[in-house]
Image (cartoon, rainbow, N blue to C red):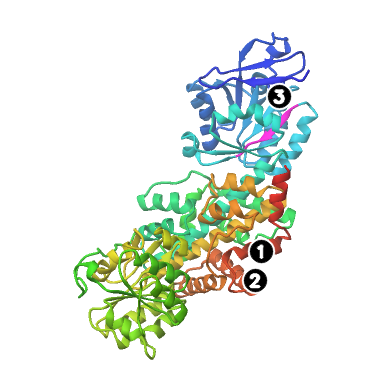
Amino acid sequence: MAHVLRFQTVASKGATVACIGHRSRCPITRKRAVRAQIDKHQEWEMVIGYIGLGALGGALARRLLATHSLCVWDINKTAVDAMEELGAQRASTAAELARRSDVILLCLPRSADVQQVVFGPHGLGEGLSDGAVIIDQTSGDPVVTREMGAQLSTRGVHMLDAPVSGGPSTVTAGNSTIMVSGAHDLFVRVLPILSAITSNVIHCGTRLGDAQAMKLVNNTMNAGCRLATLEVVAMGKKMGLSLEAMTDVVNKGSGRNSTSKTMLPALIEGRQSTQFALSLMLKDLNQGVALGMSCGAPMPVASVVRGLLQVGVNTLGKSAQLEDVVELIESMSDACIKEPLQQTPVHDAQAAVPADPNMLKVGYVGLGAMGGALTRRLMLSRKMHVFDARADLVRTFEAEGALDAADLPSLARACDVIMICVPTSAIVRQVVFGPGGLSEGLGAGKIVVDQTTGDPSETRRIAADLAKLGVSLVDAPVSGGPRGAVAGTIAIMCGGAPGTFASVRPILESISPNIVYCGETGNGHVAKLINNAVASCNRLITYETTAAGFKYGLSIESMAKVINRSSGWNGASERILPVLAAGGQTANFQLQLMVKDLKLAAQMAIDCGAPLFIANAVRNLFEVGAHRLGGEENLDAMARLLEEMAAIDFSKSMASEHSA
């Protein structure tokens, strides 16, 4: 008769496990009470062993101690003392802990440390017996873990790997994510134990080591987004933006990721955001890149990130924290990320326009996908004058209630505020100052609002030329795409004189409430380029690491579940991973336009002396994608480039998931 194990609901310390059956051995419990043939209805207190009481392991052990009897061991006696004071039992050696425990969990720096604790002198191996279970929570090497599992299985010992995403504070709050791989029935049996740590427990597959591979994918994604964000933000500081403004912009835009949500606010507030060792993150990146090499998945972006982390360990020392990577980026960029710039208050002299924004007549030039969506949003609250070189677009808007301007000078004469959304700053200049341009109808006191994603330097030159006519300029590019414009959820980044910005802010707020004032003229474009650079890094890092994980054997479905609940999460992963196998659309932006934006960001880096290693690697890949796939292709087409590079087909993940 098959042996059945049932865990009772864990509600307090001393939770029980009922083992029901005949004389067959329980694959989890192996206490002497079992070996003494306890009655099939008898219950006993289950003791869990925990080895590795560092910052993360200690937090995990304390979560278990709240609901279970816990036996602990660590080479750090102080850490053991602290756990003993909280009520844990103390073991003198790992072997003794094995003899006293039903299930043993480990959280150590490396797989080599796990090997030593399990198979070394006075290790677990000396106290393990048939039916024992080891759960390895180390961020380890999947290959080494499988080798250990095979060796332990010859002795009747079962093994699962269950690494954790989330730092000690996240674990303490019960919000960490645990990835588990190994036999499904064993996973089901230990699930109540792991659920005492967090409700976010995900089975990543039956192959031992796959959870650790998943953790490598997650940590590689996290490290890539982290360093890319810091590099781009350092460039932004050199360009004159404050850390507060950039954090606001990125978090309201497509560049958001775990670093922008946690680390940047912590830097602003002068507090620590992580206790993770820099050397351990380097270890994870070394293993992540090695994972890609082992299965033939190129990881050019991750390799740059790995190199930067290696520089960090070499220059800052092996005792440095991940938080100290900020110091490395500051040193390389000759910028102070943590030092906020004083923003100009939004008041002072008002522009010479009517005080009531509802009295302002507004025109829009450029009715393409983005400009058209913005115009339609504005039409919900006011009558709009419109112009576009494509007469068919103008007729469409006229049919929807807009006023058709005969030409650009006519629109300029009829309106107080003229908004522009065209592909490049060169076209903006042509629209304003070219033959038959706006300048022929502009007069003192009027305002031009440039919503193009443009060149900040050229924007400042255009503003200076407009000032000679008594006309003010506000640059106000947006992040969020046409769908975000229609929904009113886009972010608008603004630069310009405070008074002028104050005059047009109510108009912009009728598009979206997500407005960030970034300072002087041109800074709105700087902020947009920063957001787009970070967003592009998010996207390429997501594709690249997912390709490596997929080729290794992880399903896209499981990667989506884990990463979007973990530290690897970013604005791209949350959109891409759920639909990647099916080829779903996540963006409405041409590759050639993103290449244009990344080139502008690269030029800013050259002008201000910022290295921009990661974003430039990403720019090169986007440029390859535009050449190979076609510049008019959507950003989602980059998935095809990564498939080609890694010789994979993401759609095959869907077939395997359906057949599983």
Of the two numbered discs 1 and 2 on the same chain, state the one appearing first in sequence. Answer: 2
The residue at the point 47 percent across, 45 percent down is 274
Image quadrant assignment for residue 150: top right
The residue under the point 51% across, 61% down is 535
Label drawn at residue 327: none
- Residue 13 at x, y = what percent? 52, 19
Q: Which is nearer the N-term, disc 3 or disc 1?
A: 3
- The residue singled out by tag 2 in the image is 629
Relative height, residue 322 to residue 330 (above, below): above
Look at the image and tell me in which quarter the C terminus lies: top right
Residue labelled with disc 3: 132
Assign the N terminus to one quadrant of the image. Answer: top right
**Residue span colored magenta:** 157-163
Q: Tell me where residue 285 appears, x and y as whole percent.
A: 62, 52
Q: Are marks 1 and 2 in contact (CB under 8 Å)?
A: yes
Label 3 element class:
loop
As drawn, which residue projects farthest toward the front?
Answer: 399
Task: Give the Cα separation between the discs numbered 3 and 1.
Answer: 46 Å
The residue identified by callout 1 is 640
Do we see residue 291 in this rendering? Answer: no
Residue type indicated by callout 2: Leu
Q: Does 608 appear in magenta?
A: no
